[in-house]
Image (tube, grey):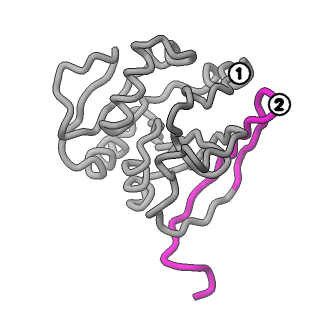
Amino acid sequence: MSELIIDFITSLDGYGAAEGWPGWWGLEGPEYFAWLEEQPERTLVMGATTYRVMSGFAADGEPGTDVLADMQKIAFSNSLKEPLTWPNTRLVRGDAVEAMRALKAEGSESYSTIGSVALSRSFLSAGLADRFRVVIFPVITGATGSERIYDGYPDVALEMVDHRTFDGGTQMVEYVPTVLTGPPGR
């Protein structure tokens, strides 16, 4: 069965990126990378901004991006131009929610977002997310953080289905999300 995981890496204070910080906040470690390599094969999905950032990291040889090169990837964008330079990436234009709904209905592959705050929010709001997974790196980037991940999200109940600690401080938590119409009990 096809599934979609909303997958984020964040600072403890909920930022997806921070000015001047390297990828993974410079705290990537062998346990985390080993876990990434153990994950079932999925097609990575992203928006234009994440495509530009991640393909740039890959071009610069950022640690861990070599694993991503061979993975199948979809960039949802009306602004990117073909040909895309990051290997194994296809461009999908138009309404990303409707395109993902159609891809999931085909049932042939599983998907995982990579970054893409607004795209992930739209997938979750549309009820397309089967799981919500967050890897929290042990830093606070209040002064330099950008891309607050949860701003603009709907209220969501989360049922924890997995958790793990990597390299002595990085935390992974995984949930089944349920989008709420408002606070419980109303």
Res 31 → quadrant: top right
Question: Residue 5 colored magenta?
Answer: no
**Secondary structure mostly seen in the magenta stretch:** strand
The label shown at residue 168 is: 2
Question: Residue 173 colored magenta?
Answer: yes
**As displayed, is residue 186 above or below residue 94?**
below
Q: Position of residue 78 (x, y in %)?
A: 18, 40
Residue at the spot 17% in from the left edge and 23% down from the top edge = 82
Q: Position of residue 130 (x, y in %)?
A: 52, 50
Residue at the spot 44% in from the left edge and 63% down from the top edge = 152
Mark 1 sits on what residue? 29
**Amino acid type, label 2:** Gly
| Nearer-N-terminus badge (2/1) | 1
Mark 2 touches mark 1? (CB < 8 Å): yes
* Cα distance between the residues tagged 2 and 1: 9 Å
Span colored in magenta = 160-186
The label shown at residue 89 is: none
- Residue 182 relative to residue 102: left or right: right
- Of all residues, the one furthest to the right in this rendering is 168
**Amino acid type, label 1:** Gly
**As displayed, is residue 160 above or below residue 33?**
below
